[in-house]
Image (spheres, grey):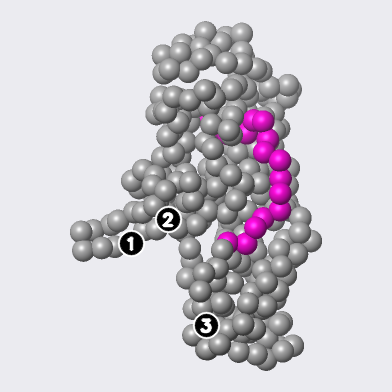
Amino acid sequence: MEFPLVSIPNSAMPNVIYHYCNAQGLKGIIEGKAIWLSDVRCCNDYMEHNWLKEKYDYKIDSLRAQEESEFHSALAAEKANYREHLAFVACFSTHGDVLSQWRAYAEDGAGFAIGFDPRYFKFSPSLPTYGSDVSVTCGLLPVCYDEIEQNQLIEQILDEYRQKALLGATPADLREVAEACYFNLQMISIFCKNPAFKEENEWRIVYRPLISRGSSGLEVFGGNSNIFFRTRNHNIIPYFKLSFAEKQIVNPVTEIILGPKRRLTDESDVLCWLLERNGSSCGRLKQSSATYR
């Protein structure tokens, strides 16, 4: 039995997505021609990837209390045997000049917002899954902050797989349906966050590699780079590099916005040199409109 990933709500792809960073981050991205996809568990939201889990686990317990069935029991078993499926993300905003973003992600206003054209990456707004090619292991997704919509997605998945379970002929079939159902619930948790973060207007590139320990050591399947490690706040953070070195008609970097604590009049030459020295056109350079110091 094969179960496709659940569809997500349609959302128009933005023209530009902005990545806020400090000066070191800007230099690393432009010179390395790569975006870093970091372990989602290391994001600044400590409920990342678990915000929705509390909701769907509660719903599973409620359904089982209301109606004891083999499917609900199989779902409860999946919940009890929870296995976290790793995801690696790069975070962007549809807005390139938001004070809270400058303060949180761009060195308290002394950083930059790099504007990327999402068409360059050719990712569809769909949930990624395991495979050997980035066309299926990577997706570009809008984050959902609306709790009503989040609960509707949970209901949609549970109802869909409840119907599939009715067709299951054996206990093994039911277990397979329950496993696919719980897997889908975990997948949508990648792009559902606490409404308190709504101002971020986040889109994210999500990468789902399969990491295993084989006889020859650590093996990574997913069609992207090998795994790397960096440190932050005394923690070791695994990440992957998503290259934008390949020449295409679409230019990956469309503009760079300087934070409110920087001055375009002082830095435009240096930024143009950095971009042109690394094979990018200077594009548009802008100054933040925030009067923050």
- Kindly identify the residue that appears in the image at 63 percent across and 43 percent down: 203
Q: CA distance from mark 3 to mark 1?
A: 26 Å
- Kindly identify the residue that appears in the image at 57 percent across and 78 percent down: 178
Q: CA distance from mark 3 to mark 2?
A: 23 Å
**Quarter of the image containing the C terminus?**
top right
Q: In the picture shown, does residue 292 fall above or below 42?
A: above
Task: Please give left or right for residue 16 compared with residue 270 in the image.
Answer: right
Q: In the picture shown, does residue 241 fall above or below 77?
A: above
**Position in image of residue 77 (x %, y %):** 54, 83
* Magenta residue check for 13: yes
Badge 3 or badge 2: first in the primary sequence: 2
SS at badge 1:
strand
Q: Nearer the viewer, mark 2 or mark 1?
A: 2
- Kindly identify the residue that appears in the image at 35 percent across and 47 percent down: 227
* Residue that protrudes farthest toward the left in the picture: 216
Category of crowding for the residue at label 1, using alpha-carbon neighbours closer than 10 angstroms: few (below 14), some (14–19), many (at least 20):
few
Q: Which mark is residue 131?
A: 2
**Position in image of residue 242 (x %, y %):** 44, 39
Location of residue 127 by image quarter: bottom right
207 or 135, which lies in front?
135
SS at badge 2:
loop
Category of crowding for the residue at label 2, using alpha-carbon neighbours closer than 10 angstroms: few (below 14), some (14–19), many (at least 20):
some
**Position in image of residue 235 (x %, y %):** 42, 50
Dominant secondary-structure state across the stretch colored magenta: loop
Q: In the picture shown, does residue 194 fall above or below 231?
A: below
The boundaries of the magenta stretch are 5-24
- Kindly identify the residue that appears in the image at 54 percent across and 25 percent down: 250
* Magenta residue check for 86: no
Disc 3 marks a residue whose amino acid type is Asp
The residue beneath circle 1 is: 212
Q: Which mark is residue 173?
A: 3
